[in-house]
Amino acid sequence: MAETLRIGGACGFWGEAPHATAQLLAGGVDVLVYDYLAEITMSLLARAKARDPGAGYAPDFVTDAVTPNLIEIAKSGVKLLSNAGGMNPAACANAVRAAIDAAGLSLRVAVVEGDDLMSRAEEYAGVSEMFSGAAMPQRDKIASMNAYLGALPVVAALRAGANIVITGRCADSALTLAACMWRFDWGPGSYDLLAAGSLAGHLLECGPQATGGNFTDWEAAGDLARIGYPIAEVAEDGSILLTKPQGTTGTVTRASVCEQMLYEIGDPRAYLLPDVICDFSRVVLLQAGPDRVSLTGARGRPPTGQLKVCATYQDGYRGGMVFQMNGRNAGRKARAFAQAGLDRARARLRDMGAPDFTETALEAFGGHPGQGDYQEIAFKAAVRHPDARAVGLFLKELTGTALATPPGLHFFTGAGRPKPTPVVALFSFLIEAADITCRVTLDEDELAFAPGLPSPPRETLEPAPQPPAPETGGEQATVPLEQLAWARSGDKGDSASIGVIARHPDALPRIWAGLSAEVIAQLFEPELRGEVQRYYLPGSHAMNIVMTQVLGGGGIASLRNDPQGKSFAQRLLSLSIAVPASLIHRMEGVAE
């Protein structure tokens, strides 16, 4: 039987539940990977480091993941790879070493540095944002500037004997890829294998999202409190089998795993990573047993030779509140209340000679119709302004209007009036990989490290595949898309993507035809400012939809109720699609 490497995905974001490490250790793994970082997380860690030079990392890795499990980690020989170092990998490593010493153990800790470019920010003052073309913000507004590193520095640390490797910013999947390259001695030019290792990392990087979390058919996951975290069994030939610890809840099916494969990848034929350009369009997923899914067919090409850099910067302030309204014409009453607060605040700004708000958002969501004209609705009112005092003025006037409101206003709060918060915006750009100097240390000893930087050949891709023409003729039926497909959505900056997987292969041509760019644009017309792109994945009978300029800036920069597009898939699944009645009959009895 071919050797396999069992890698557990123990963390998908800073703040996730702390029990995954113990669960995966009990389930039997060789390596644990932890992804703590998002773009906004970097800005938060940068501010923490500015206040305390010993801070700036994710302390949960030390207190929740490592310290309670150190004896089992040492006993089993499991390797731990984590980007918990954030803005201060060395301080994170020192905290881990202190915990190891306190436990009377001997484990070697390595640190990867070089992603933090704040000291070189002036060098990049003239670059443009890679998506919007905007100019680089002023230096005094920038909170963080980090390049996405690849797998090779982590491989060097593992080859030198590290038990625990702590990095700053790296590609989310790079930790898993590094483990595979170390164990199987994959070279930096074995691009198909690198793509497979990156696919395994992409499946693990969001924790239980591959095992029933955030899944369209979420009922199949059972008791979410006991959901199992993912384990990728990777073979030397790059084949992957995804599973979870026995005795846990959740579900591992072609659908749950494919939702995660499509999550936030953009063009599936050109998923750009520091070490490889991945093509997941022809990946085939097969149910290999209960809670076991095999994946084969990932392909890779040479990397671009460039690295993505994400800077975060302060872009004014925002503030708002969510309140409820009920009764007759609840939506109209809620908007009248919010507009009154906004009008009062604007009048005060004019009296002071201050500029107007740069952006406002009055947004209704939810709603429960009752008997007759009775309704219940939630409503959000929010503003942005360069000056925190102007935002505070709006919040004061909004709450101060509460006695002059239409009837039915109510809300829950335990901390008084909301307060203005800084807007942290994202600025992304590309640099040459050769511009980065990585430093790898193992227990304070610096390791010799010289990553290879291949010159990618010019390649001409074949035309993008297109699905076959849909069936025509016969009796037609109109059904919700959810009856035909699974879907999941996510974000990249101000863009949103929705992966759609056909429940039956024969349904994909109809789904593709029904979800035209025009139909999608119309559905998201209130938000969409950019374009709609569609990509076909013949291997998984799926499509990926990418919408640009649809999230109001995205993340903390957005005033939207859903600034990361997490609910977009649910909106799409509510659309009706016309299909042959014979297809519905073929789909009956097909289960995942």
Image: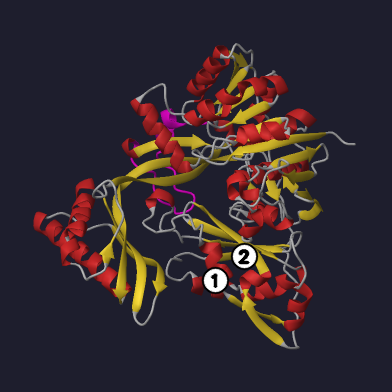
Residue 4: x and y in percent read 81, 35
- For marks 1 and 2, the one nearer the N-term is 1
**At 75% from the left edge and 36% from the top edge, which residue is drawn?**
189
**At 73% from the left edge and 30% from the top edge, which residue is drawn?**
30
**At 68% from the left edge and 26% from the top edge, which residue is drawn?**
79
Residue 581: x and y in percent read 73, 83
Q: Is the residue 350 above or below the residue 512 in the image? A: above
| Position of residue 414 in the picture relative to residue 132 (left or right) | left
Q: Which residue is mark 1?
A: 520
**Residue type beneath disc 2:** Arg
Q: Which residue is mark 2?
A: 534
Residue 62's disc is none
Which residue range is magenta in the image? 114-139
State the residue in front, 107 or 28.
Answer: 28
| Position of residue 29 in the picture relative to residue 217 (left or right) | right
Residue 558: x and y in percent read 39, 54
Query: Pointers 1 and 2 in contact (CB under 8 A)?
Result: yes
Q: Secondary structure at mark 2?
A: strand
Dividing the image into 4 quarters, which one contains the N terminus?
top right
Residue 386: x and y in percent read 25, 49
**Residue type beneath disc 1:** Ile
